Amino acid sequence: MSELRVLIAEDDPELRRVLRRGLAEEGFAPETVGTGAELLARIDSESPDLLVVDIGLPDADGRDLCQALRARGIQVPVLFLTARDALPDRLSGFDAGGDDYVTKPFAFAEVVARLQALARRAGADGVIEAAGLRLDPITHAVSCGSSSTPLTPTEFRLLARLLARPSEAVRRRDLIRAGWPYGAIVHENTLDAYVARLRRKLGALDGAPPITTVHGVGYALR
Ligand code: CA
């Protein structure tokens, strides 16, 4: 794999230095900025393969920045850094693109592992690959081996969320946040109806993992 370009947005200079040096030692090509404004200003010229974004930047919430990037059509995977006492479940809505997060203080190896997983999953073209499935964001199709089926955008976002951490149970509210835009009114049985449709579509693919109901929690791809 050629050097992956990582753009890091973190306002703590010490943490920024540690991340930059550590990622360079791990074979990444890191660049750093200290504010959200700098991130937005440099994203096009840096054209990173991966982003590391602190949630608590002085001038912006990292999640809002991510949303702004997505609105500009920038699909670079984001690894969020967040304080342990921040609400991690608010992050889940950003998992639709396969994004991830680590809580501070983190083990550096964890950051590297998450970045490598994001890079593998999202590839240069934004294709998400996990659990034997391949999700193509351009065609909105899911494929498994040689079989393939088209998805609606909502089905695509739900499946991407399930694939973000394969085999882990995903809470119903996290799926609803991932599947529908912020503020949308989604009835409980709407999610179930969409999952039922996804199940039928996956069931028609050779060797695709099933979507399992995890009682009292939500759903898992396993
Ligand atoms: Ca901060």
Image: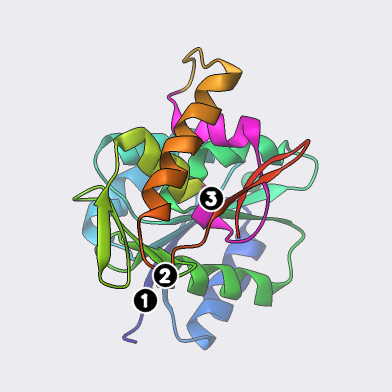
Check disc 3 and report its element: helix, strand or loop.
Answer: helix
Q: Is residue 131 left or right of residue 219?
A: left
Q: How far apart, in angstroms, are the residues tagged by discs 1 and 2?
A: 8 Å
User: Residue 122: in sight, yes or no?
Assistant: yes
Q: Mark 3: which amino acid?
A: Leu
Q: Are discs 3 and 2 less than 8 Å apart at CB? A: no
Give coordinates of residue 114: x percent, y percent: 57, 68
On whether ligand 1 comes within 8 Å of the CB at mark 3, the answer is: no
Packing grade of label 3 (10 A; few <14, some 14-19, many >=20) is many
Q: Which residues are magenta?
A: 162-181
**Coloration of the structure image:** rainbow
Q: Disc 3 designates what residue?
A: 162
Corner quadrant of residue 65: top left
Looking at the figure, which quarter contains the C terminus? bottom right
Residue picked out by circle 1: 4
For the N terminus, the image quarter is: bottom left
Q: Kindly state the secondary structure of the residue where label 1 is placed.
A: loop
Q: Nearer the viewer, mark 1 or mark 2?
A: 2
Q: Gap in Å between the C-alphas at discs 3 and 1?
A: 25 Å
Task: Please give the name of the residue rendered at 53% of the width and 36% of the height, measured from the top-left corner.
Answer: 93
Q: Which residue shows up at 41% across the image and 49% down it?
A: 97
Q: Along the polypeptide, which appears first: circle 3 or circle 2? A: 2
Distance (Cα) linking label 3 and label 2: 17 Å
Residue at mark 2: 119
Left or right: 126 as drawn, with respect to 78: left
Image quarter for residue 125?
A: bottom left
Q: Could you tell me residue 154's position as x and y percent?
A: 37, 33
Please report contact status of discs 1 and 2: CB closer than 8 Å, yes or no: yes
Query: Which secondary structure, mark 2?
Result: helix
Percent x, y of residue 83: 73, 47
Residue at x-position 23% and y-position 53%: 44
